[in-house]
Amino acid sequence: MSFSNLSVALENLPTTELVNFQPIQPTYLKVLRISWSIIFGLLFVALIALFVFVQELQSVQWILILSFSYLLLTISTVIIGTASFKQKAFAIREKDILYKTGWIFSSMHIIPFNRIQHCVLNIGPIERKYGLASIGIYTAASDVYDVFIRGLSKEQAEQLRDFILQQIQKEASND
Amino acid sequence: MINWQQPQRQSLAALAIMGIHFFKQVFGALWPMLIVPFLNNNEKKLSIVLLAIAFIILVAIVFAVLGYLNFKFYINDNKFIILSGVFKKKVITIPLEKIQSIHLEQSLLHSVTGTFKVLIDTAGTEKVESSIYALNTHVAASLKDWVLSNRGSQAIEYETVQSPKIIIQTTTNDLVKLCLTANHLETLLLVCVFVFSKLEDMKPLLNKMSFGWLEKYEQEIEITWMLAVTVIVLIAVLSIVLSSIRTILRYANFKVEVSAKGFHIKGGLIKMKQMIIPFKKVQLINWNANLLKRFTGMYVLHLKATGESDLNKKQKVLLPITQQNQLDAIIPFYEDEIPANNTQVNGIHQVFVWRRIFMIGLPVTIVITSIGCFLFSYSGLWAITWLIYFTIITTLYKKNFHFWINTNALQVIKGVWGRQHTLMKWNNVQFVTLKQSPYQRKKQLASLIFYTAGGKVILPYLTLTDATILVDYVAMKIESSNTRWM
């Protein structure tokens, strides 16, 4: 029986710092803008309905407070959402997948293929219009997805799904 | 010998248990409405309520009988199959090799009827997959043995453990120590939460009750220091009594054994619990001591198995450690080389303290002091002392936060007054996240979160260089290892 237990020099480790991250599709910003328009449009209608039907809110004070809150929420969502969009990027290495997200609070997730339980490809109605898709990656760490990569082209997402499934099968056959 | 391929019914005791379970659910939701007429002596409404209770009992009986008749289980083609449902039929199929453990639980009703509740626990993050309400003791034990010995090659690697070996067995002395060092504050908080949640249910009832008899005492009672001290002492005594009762109910007759199958855990005074946790299912170990336990060398050890985040506190595997040798006997079944024994100690960055004070301590102090001054004028300035307390606890937390890293595992010790120890094998890590706030980016710092199937471990405020090296190292460990994580 052969046994080896060589020491590993930390400077020789493949480092995440040198990885070239691939940004998500620029058209995803359009998807985001349409989603925000729908959500804030509906909120606007709800707000108007509140002013019309709730008598207690028909005062300058309430109209100013609620309108200001609405504007603040809309502007901050658009600014933070757009800046976060620019930060989203992913990289696929031989043994793992990396995903960067977040503008104010940034995160980088490193998910080894030999820990992925399954992955899910999602295509929403707006994403479909622009030929985009999302991939949810699940490990045993939680019941919900651990990483959700949005804004991939449909082909990219399908390729990524197939690649991940291939890696899972490869890891399973190595066990 | 029972033929498990034939569909089996539960013990007849299940009928009563299912009926009581249904009655408790319905009555639990409706009781405040139902007892109002009793208190107001309203005879007309009383008869309606009695009729309603009789109806609930009747429906409970019907549901229990239908549920009992429709509930069957059997094993076919290496699959455990459970058929259930009253109106909507449900078929649960669990491959035997997926079954991690079978837990037996005994409530008071179970012990009176000589039965056990059987809980089937599977791999992955799912909750306890399914349960059988009541099986006679010998049937439950035989089912457990049959399944565990026929579920295939379930990683029985610990062949050195030939016969079960007792590691923990609580004595009366241990129970007394555990009662005295229990978390009395937690019990008090639980009682408060329970009382407030029930108060909400009882609102309609309280509105209809008269408290005139209390009002005459209102003038007579004078708030003095004596009264305040008496109330505080009474609350303290009540908390100690209640947490002692909780401890006795949980840890009386408590026994932990190890065998080739894993940890065998038995215990409980009224509700007897039996479970087997296979070694491989344990993803993370925590052993914690509050201030009282710390000074007496005692801990509560938490075996964090897969699916831990979905379990409620009652289902968590918490073991009372009253002697250091018990801890020394358990830990090697998870990891035999403790990083703290032979590696260099590490800490978190000094800015952690100032950052927490600036981001949490200061804003909270400003808000509570403003509210305090608004309500109580200058006396509200006392709220500033919160900032002093917060600074002390944050400084202590930073000072006490230590971690050690070796080639197999990460060990963390933290805590302000008490101590929380965590041991996590790199092989159990599912994925890693490196996080940075704008301030951390500016100062070249980062926090790391290691996610396992049993929970997560956070290392806050490391230098970015150290964090990156550690991420790369852990990724290499996970990706190059051929050892299964479960």
Image (cartoon, coloured by chain):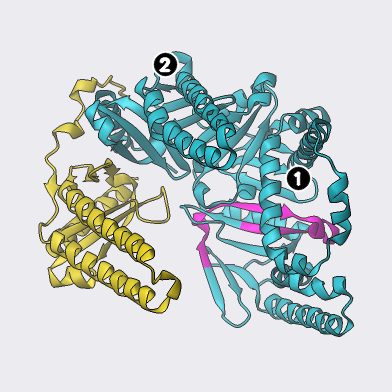
Chain colours: A yellow, B cyan
Q: Position of residue B160 (x, y in %)?
A: 57, 31
- Identify the image quadrant of the N terminus of chain B: bottom right
* B143 relative to B372 in the view: left or right: right
* B56 relative to B461 in the view: left or right: right
The correct choice, above or below, for B52 with respect to A8 in the image is below
What is the crowding at mark 1: few (fewer than 14 residues within 10 Å), some, or many (at least 20)?
A: many
Amino acid on which the number 2 mark rests in the picture: Val
Give the total of numbered labels. 2
Please state which of residues B12 and B186 is positioned toward the viewer in this rendering: B186
* Residue that numbered label 2 is attached to: B345
The segment highlighted magenta reads B93-119
Q: Position of residue A3 (x, y in %)?
A: 32, 25
* Residue that numbered label 1 is attached to: B268
What is the crowding at mark 2: few (fewer than 14 residues within 10 Å), some, or many (at least 20)?
A: some
Q: Position of residue B254 (x, y in %)?
A: 74, 38
* Magenta stretch encompasses residue B104: yes
The correct choice, above or below, for B310 with respect to B486 in the image is below
* Magenta stretch encompasses residue B254: no
